[in-house]
Amino acid sequence: MFESAELGHKIDKDIYDKEVTALRAALLDAQLDMANLAQFPLIILIGGVDGAGRGETVNLLNEWMDPRYLQTHGMGKPSDEELDRPMMWRFWRELPPKGRTGIFLGSWYTWPIIKRVQGEIKTAELDQGLERARRMETMLVDEGALILKFWMHLSRDKQRKRLKLLENDPKTRWRVTKRDWQHYKKYDKFHVVGESVIRHTSTAEAPWTIVEGFDSYYRSLTVGKVMLEAIRKRLDEAATRREEISAPPPLPSIDKLNILKSLDLDQKISKKAYQDELEKYQGTLALLTRSPSFKKITVIAMFEGNDAAGKGGAIRRITGALDARYYNVIPIAAPTEEERAQPYLWRFWRHIPRRGRFTIFDRSWYGRVLVERVEKLCSEANWMRAYGEINDFESQLVRHSIVLVKFWLTISREEQLKRFKEREAVAFKHFKITAEDWRNREKWDEYEAAVCDMMDRTSTAIAPWTLVEANDKYFASIKILKTLCEQIENMLHKKV
């Protein structure tokens, strides 16, 4: 796999000087066109062998390109804040928006490689991490990103020779660290793991470009030309609409039975029982979140449901038991311009809390398979692939000891009409009813079908949906609080 990158590729200085001026000008033009059109982001990953010119390449790109549209991220050892979240959080928050370029020196591959070489993880864990990275890249490409991955390679002899050359020159001595020589001693292990990474993650949509890194002229021209060709190709393709893939039709409802219609919406509790249960479970929730073990976990409660189903009231019952310093409520509405310039899940990743915190989403990442699907705000291909992307997202949360509790509040069509009319009649409830609510009601059957598909495809063993019968607000509030307490208590017992 690395044979071609050990042939001794070299470019004379005269040839380099002759070509580099035109290359730089062309790259700047392409970068400006990309920024003006703002149709896709460019994500550049720089990986490879120590001493192969990774840092030099990043510095060169910063020199060649317009810094207004470029940001470099040196992803070193994760900070405490980053370790409090799933591993991919630190990369999601740094993704460039459309029209911009993000260079990652140290990517989502770096630490899995180092950990495997050092024996901190097994091959199976590395493979699982690579699969997550591959799926993320597929998702980014589906969202329109252009991903360029460069692996700077050196043979064992040339790595030693280059480290010596850098170390013996007073101007470059600072570039060689004790860590570089430690990694050199494990060259064979890095070689094996690196080859495995490239083999598993060099895909059609995001292939690795392996570059021999000993000769700086060759390395620089190669990277620059690959970038230029890729950007120009994407700009030319941008005017051509991508062919959408039609999904097979959903399962027909032959007997008209579905998961929502199977719920008993007549369940009620008395006001007295509600008050007693509310005090009990709010007290339990308060004690659980004050437990010393709670600092080891994170809680995300997510609410979806019919319009007027009582999501806001249920959220207030939860926050009434929490310390305001340690929770956030995130209301999700139509995406802003900033959010539309990023991949769909970006605006949710950015709100993932640290350990010991509680975040509540009032509506969520399921908007793509609900409102965006029904209102045709995205293509069928986009909302169909969203199921898999959401399951991946939630699996990353759960495996990081995040208690993820997903509530769907459902009411009958008759109860919704009653609540809509009440909101129109009561002055201080006017803000709760909009023309959009009435429009959504006209598409009740379409939303119901979308919800049932969502349940079938995203209610997983690790992140199941809790269906809440919400015709009676007292019953709904207690079921939500009780479920939340049970889920948190289960996780705390695992941490003891």
Image (cartoon, helix red, strand yellow):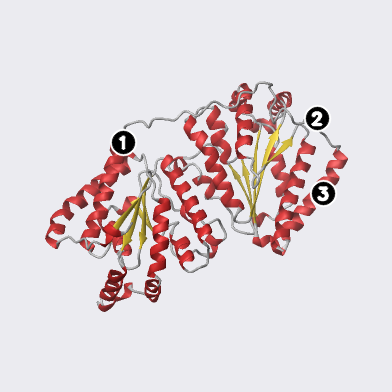
Q: Earlier in the sequence, mark 2 or mark 1?
A: 1
Few, some or many residues within 10 Å of mark 1 (<14, 14–19, 20+):
few
Q: Residues within 10 Å of mark 2 (few under 14, many from 20)?
A: few
Closer to the camera, 331 or 1?
A: 1
Please identify the quarter of the rendering in which residue 475 is found.
top right
| Residue plotted at (29% across, 44% down) | 231
Q: Are marks 2 and 1 in contact (CB under 8 Å)?
A: no
Which of the two labelled residues, at mark 1 and mark 3, occupies the earlier sequence position?
Answer: 1
412 is higher (above) or lower (below) than 150: above
Q: Report x, y in % for residue 241.
A: 36, 30
According to the picture, the residue beneath numbered tag 1 turns out to be 237
The amino acid sitting under disc 1 is Glu
**Which amino acid, by three-letter code, is at mark 3?**
Glu
Q: Give the vertical position of 93 relative to 169 (above or below).
A: above
**Residue at disc 1, secondary structure:** helix
Residue 375 horizontal side relative to residue 144, left or right:
right
Q: Amino acid at mark 2?
A: Asp
Q: Is residue 384 visible?
A: yes
Label 2 SS: loop
Whether label 2 touches label 3, CB < 8 Å: no
Q: Earlier in the sequence, mark 2 or mark 3?
A: 2
Kindly identify the residue that appears in the image at 52 percent across and 67 percent down. 120
- Give the alpha-carbon distance from disc 2 to disc 3, as whole Å: 23 Å
Q: Is residue 143 visible?
A: no
* Front one among 70 and 188: 188
Residue displayed at 17% across by 60% down = 11
User: Helix, strand, or loop for circle 3?
Assistant: helix
- Give the residue number, with chain letter if any, for mark 3: 279
Residue corresponding to mark 2: 266
Could you tell whether 341 is left or right of 10 in the image?
A: right
